[in-house]
């Protein structure tokens, strides 16, 4: 999947992955794809919930060797 912005939140615990995603959404152009990488187990719950609350499309979530990857489309 083509990604416009990649956020590396590996090693960061809640709430830092969400704060990084929020900051990226504030500066991103509408329709851009952001990929956020996280190894925080709570991110599996937090990121989809954040996307729902903010009206951001969660395109895909994927388990990876070093954690999780989430792709979201900016509104």
Image (cartoon, rainbow, N blue to C red):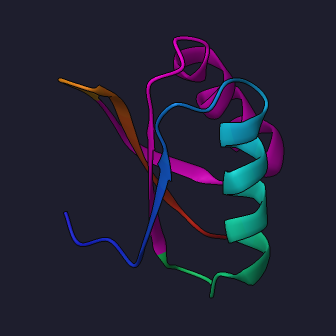
Q: In the figure, residue 12 lies in which quadrant?
A: top right
In the rendered picture of this protein, how many numbered marks are placed on residues? 0
Q: Nearer the viewer, residue 68 or 16?
A: 16
26 up-or-down from 73: above or below: below
23 up-or-down from 32: above or below: above
Image location (x, y in percent) of residue 42: 61, 13
* Residue 35 drawn in magenta: yes
Image location (x, y in percent) of residue 68: 36, 29
Image location (x, y in percent) of residue 7: 49, 58
In this image, 41 relative to 51: left or right? left
The quadrant of the rendering that contains the C terminus is bottom right
Q: Nearer the viewer, residue 24 or 30?
A: 24
In this image, 30 relative to 58: left or right? right
Q: In the figure, residue 52 lies in which quadrant?
A: top right
In this image, 19 relative to 3: left or right? right
The quadrant of the rendering that contains the N terminus is bottom left
Please state the extent of the stretch shown in magenta in the rendering.
33-62
Q: Residue furthest front?
A: 11
Q: Could you tell me which residue is drawn at 60 percent across and 30 percent down?
A: 48
72 up-or-down from 41: above or below: below
* Residue 50 drawn in magenta: yes
In this image, 21 relative to 9: left or right? right
Q: Nearer the viewer, residue 39 or 60?
A: 39
53 up-or-down from 20: above or below: above
Q: Residue furthest bottom?
A: 29
Q: Could you tell me which residue is drawn at 79 percent across and 30 percent down?
A: 15
Q: Could you tell me which residue is drawn at 52 percent across and 79 percent down?
A: 31
Image location (x, y in percent) of residue 65: 18, 23
């Amino acid at each position: 999947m083509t990604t416009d912005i990649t956020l590396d939140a590996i090693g960061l615990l809640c709430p830092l992955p969400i704060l990084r995603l929020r900051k990226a959404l504030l500066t991103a152009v509408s329709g851009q794809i952001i990929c956020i990488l996280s190894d925080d187990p709570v991110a599996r719950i937090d990121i989809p919930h954040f996307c729902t609350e903010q009206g951001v499309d969660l395109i895909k979530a994927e388990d990876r060797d070093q954690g999780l990857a989430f792709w979201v489309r900016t509104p």
